[in-house]
Image (cartoon, helix red, strand yellow):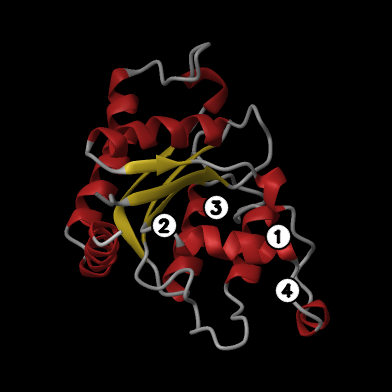
Amino acid sequence: MSTLKILAFAGTQRQASFNRKLVRVAARGAAAAGVEIVEFEWSEYAMPLYDPDLETHGFPESVLRFKALLAAHHGFLIGVPEYNGLMSPLLKNAFDWASRPVPGEKPMVCFKHKVVGLVSTSPGVFGAVLGLASVRTLLTRLGAFVIPEQYPVGEAGKIFDEAGDLRDPKQKAAAEGVGARLATVLKHWPEANATVSTNSAAGSKA
């Protein structure tokens, strides 16, 4: 039977990223609520800087694969780094490319009707809250529904143990709560459930 699928990732390539650790904690909450969690490596989707001239000559293959990856999932769970008060250049560039339609494609197909949960952390006390806000604004503009629940947490260098888990049970519960809430919303989201029902029906005829 087909299941609801959430793509969980951080907006950075850094392997030891605090936001990568945080989004994995949040993802456990979503998985415990009964959805499938999928991660990916940015290195597998290396994209050039968005350039309209490049677009006119055809989308890079990595962009097409990234668009397909987004389209194949019902929701996203994103760990948001903050660069000078905004989202990371990596995340902005990837979303800029993904927002561009290939010929014959409906606008914003990678984002419309997707449900998104956001978490963020930084070494400072504000937990990348400005970067988080910029991602919320962009994704809403692209047609996604970003759940109101979010979790910015500061002092990233102190809050994780050696295994990458949050030391404080209350912080851990808050992060997992964002993932759990995302899963709950998805279970009641008409577009997501329509896709699952269609895939299940197709599978039963195979």
Q: Give the residue drawn at x 65%, y 69%.
A: 97
Question: Of the numbered discs in the image, which one, if any, rests on residue 73?
Answer: 2
Asked which secondary structure carries label 4, the reply is: loop
Is 165 rendered above or below residue 49? above
Asked which secondary structure carries label 1, the reply is: helix
Mark-to-mark CA distance, 3 and 1: 25 Å
Mark-to-mark CA distance, 2 and 3: 23 Å
**What kind of residue is marked 4?**
Phe
The residue under label 4 is 59
**What kind of residue is marked 1?**
Ser
Q: Where is residue 102? Give x, y as percent.
A: 62, 81
**What kind of residue is marked 2?**
His
Asked which secondary structure carries label 2, the reply is: loop
Quadrant of res 29: top left
Q: Where is residue 191? Give x, y as percent.
A: 26, 69
The residue under label 3 is 131
